[in-house]
Image (spheres, rainbow, N blue to C red):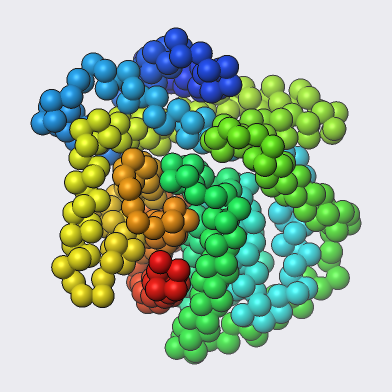
C-alpha cells in the first residue's frame, strides 16, 4: 500500500511541476485548475505513507489556514484552487536542484578540492576559514547535504584528533558555514523565494548577503579562536601533524579535477546570471530550467547520456518520495499564505510588528523582524518554511524599507535560527554524524556567536536607516 502511494505521489508531483512549467512558459490560464488539483492530490497522497510525526507540521499549517478562511468568511473552495498553486515554483526548484549532484558524482571533485586546499590550510584559523568557505561552495550544489559529506571527509583527515574541542571546531564551522549561505547563495531555495517575493534586486541581494556572510565568517573565525584558547587545546599542532602524514600523497590528476570543479561552478552560476539579465521571467522559473540544461549538456559532453536516465529512475523511485514531508509543508504553507492574503490578515500581522517595535524607544521594525524567524524556528519550522511564510506575507504589504534591507532582516534571522535551534534539520543531520546532542551542536556551541552576529547585522541595518532613510 505504501509503495503504491509513493509511486502515486511521485506521479502527481511530476505532473504538478511539469504543469507549472507549461503555465509559466506558455501562460495558459486554463491549466491553473489542473495545476492546483495535481498539488492537492500529491498533498493528500503523501499522508498515506508519511508518519504522523512528519505530517504534523503540514497538518498544523493547513488547520490554521482553514481557521483563517472560516473567521474571515472567504471561500474555502476558491482557496483550494488558488492556494495549492502558490508554491509550485519553489517546489519545482526543490525538485530540480538535487540533480546537480548527478554531475558531481561522476568524479571525486570535492575530495580533490579538499586535498588541494590542505597545503594552504596549515593553521587552525586558516583551516577553520577553509572549512566554512568549502561548506559554502559545496552547499551551492548540495544544499545542507554538504554538512554530512564534508564532515566525513574532514573527520577522515583529522582521524587521530578526538574530544569536544575538535567536535566544536568541526561542527561550528560546518553549521555556521551552511547557515551563512542562506544570505546569498543563489541555489538556496529560501533565499531565491524571498528575493522573488519581495521584488529585491538579485545582484544587490547577493552582493549585500555575501558581504555580511563574509563578515560573519571572520567573526566566526575570531570566536573560534577564543573557544580554542578556553579549551586549552593546540589545534594547529594537530592539523600540522595530519598534514605531515599525507605530505607527498597528492592524487594523480587531482589538480585537473579542481580546475573542472571551478569550471562547473562558474558555468552554472554564470548561466543563471546571464539568463536572469536577458529574460524577465521569475528566478524560480529560470534557475531550474538552467540547471536541467546544464546537467544534460554536461552528460552529453561526457558522452554518457544514459546516465541521465539511470539517475532519473533512481531519483523517481526513492528521491522524490523522500521529499514528501518537505513538499507537504510547502503546499500547506502556500495554502496558508493564500489564506492570509485573501483575508487581509497580513496587514494586521505587519502592523502588529510595527506596534511592538514602536512601543520601545529606539526600536524599529528591522530590530524585531529577525526574531519572527528565530521564534518560529524554535517551534520546529525550518528556515525555508519560515522564510516562505514571512516573505509571502510581506509580499502584499507596504513596508517603508527597501526590499533588499527587509530581505537581509529575514535572512539574518534564518542564519541564527539554523545555528541555535535544535529542531532544525541541518543541526539534526550534523548530530547524526558527530554523535553530539542536538542541543550542544546548536544552542550551546553557537548562542554567543549568534548574539554577536545579530548585533553586527543590526549595526549595518540601522546604519543604513540613519544614513539613507
Q: Residue at x 51, y 75 (%)?
A: 220
Q: Is residue 91 visible?
A: yes
Q: Quadrant of the C terminus?
A: bottom left
Q: Residue at x 66, y 77 (%)?
A: 126
Q: Is residue 345 left or right of residue 439?
A: left
**Numbered-mark total:** 0
Q: Nearer the viewer, residue 55 or 251?
A: 55
- Where is residue 414? Give x, y as percent: 40, 57
Q: Is residue 178 visible?
A: no
Q: Quadrant of the N terminus?
A: top left
Q: Residue at x 60, y 34 (%)?
A: 280
Q: Is residue 73 left or right of residue 7?
A: left
- Where is residue 424? Give x, y as percent: 37, 53
- Where is residue 223? Give x, y as percent: 48, 81
Q: Is residue 254 left or right of residue 323?
A: right
Residue placed furthest toward the top: 30
Q: Residue at x 33, y 40 (%)?
A: 396
Q: Nearer the viewer, residue 220 or 151?
A: 220
Residue placed furthest toward the left: 71
Residue 224 to residue 29: above or below: below
Residue 143 to residue 281: above or below: below
Q: Is residue 432 left or right of residue 270?
A: left
Amino acid at each position: 500500500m505504501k509503495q503504491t502511494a509513493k509511486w502515486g505521489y511521485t506521479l502527481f508531483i511530476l505532473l504538478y511541476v511539469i504543469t507549472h512549467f507549461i503555465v509559466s512558459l506558455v501562460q495558459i490560464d486554463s491549466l491553473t485548475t489542473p495545476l492546483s488539483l495535481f498539488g492537492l492530490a500529491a498533498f493528500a497522497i503523501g499522508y498515506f505513507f508519511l508518519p504522523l510525526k512528519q505530517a504534523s507540521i503540514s497538518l498544523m499549517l493547513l488547520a490554521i489556514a482553514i481557521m483563517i478562511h472560516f473567521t474571515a468568511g472567504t471561500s474555502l473552495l476558491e482557496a483550494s484552487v488558488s492556494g495549492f498553486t502558490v508554491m509550485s515554483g519553489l517546489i519545482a526548484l526543490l525538485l530540480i536542484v538535487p540533480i546537480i549532484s548527478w554531475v558531481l558524482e561522476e568524479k571525486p571533485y570535492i575530495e580533490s578540492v579538499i586535498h588541494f586546499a590542505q597545503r594552504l590550510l596549515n593553521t587552525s584559523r586558516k583551516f577553520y576559514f577553509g572549512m566554512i568557505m568549502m561548506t559554502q561552495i559545496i552547499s551551492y550544489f548540495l544544499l545542507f547535504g554538504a554538512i554530512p559529506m564534508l564532515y566525513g571527509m574532514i573527520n577522515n583527515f583529522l582521524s587521530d584528533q578526538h574530544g569536544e574541542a575538535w567536535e566544536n571546531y568541526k561542527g561550528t564551522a560546518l553549521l555556521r558555514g551552511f547557515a551563512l549561505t542562506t544570505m546569498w547563495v543563489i541555489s538556496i531555495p529560501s533565499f531565491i523565494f524571498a528575493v522573488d517575493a519581495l521584488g529585491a534586486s538579485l545582484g544587490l541581494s547577493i552582493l549585500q548577503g555575501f558581504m555580511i556572510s563574509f563578515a560573519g565568517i571572520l567573526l566566526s573565525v575570531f570566536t573560534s579562536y577564543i573557544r580554542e584558547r578556553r579549551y586549552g587545546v593546540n589545534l594547529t599542532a594537530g592539523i600540522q601533524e595530519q598534514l605531515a602524514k599525507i605530505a607527498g600523497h597528492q592524487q594523480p590528476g587531482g589538480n585537473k579535477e579542481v580546475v573542472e570543479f571551478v569550471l562547473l561552478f562558474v558555468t552554472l552560476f554564470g548561466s543563471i546570471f546571464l539568463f536572469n539579465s536577458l529574460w524577465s521571467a521569475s528566478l524560480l522559473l529560470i534557475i531550474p530550467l538552467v540547471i536541467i540544461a546544464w546537467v544534460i549538456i554536461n552528460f552529453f559532453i561526457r558522452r554518457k547520456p544514459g546516465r541521465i536516465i539511470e539517475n532519473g529512475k533512481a531519483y523517481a523511485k526513492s528521491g522524490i518520495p523522500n521529499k514528501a514531508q518537505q513538499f507537504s509543508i510547502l503546499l500547506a504553507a502556500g495554502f496558508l499564505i493564500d489564506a492570509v492574503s485573501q483575508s487581509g490578515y497580513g496587514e494586521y500581522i505587519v502592523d502588529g510588528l510595527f506596534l511592538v517595535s514602536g512601543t520601545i524607544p529606539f526600536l524599529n521594525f528591522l530590530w524585531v523582524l529577525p526574531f519572527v524567524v528565530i521564534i518560529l524556528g524554535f517551534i520546529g519550522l525550518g528556515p525555508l518554511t519560515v522564510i516562505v511564510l514571512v516573505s509571502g506575507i510581506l509580499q502584499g504589504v507596504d513596508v517603508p524599507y527597501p526590499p533588499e534591507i527587509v530581505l537581509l532582516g529575514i535572512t539574518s534571522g534564518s542564519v541564527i535560527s539554523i545555528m541555535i535551534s535544535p529542531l532544525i534539520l541541518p543541526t539534526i543531520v550534523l548530530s547524526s554524524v558527530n554523535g553530539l546532542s542536538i542541543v550542544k551542536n546548536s544552542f550551546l556551541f553557537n548562542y554567543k556567536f549568534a548574539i554577536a552576529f545579530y548585533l553586527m547585522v543590526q549595526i549595518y541595518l540601522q546604519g543604513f536607516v540613519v544614513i539613507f532613510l
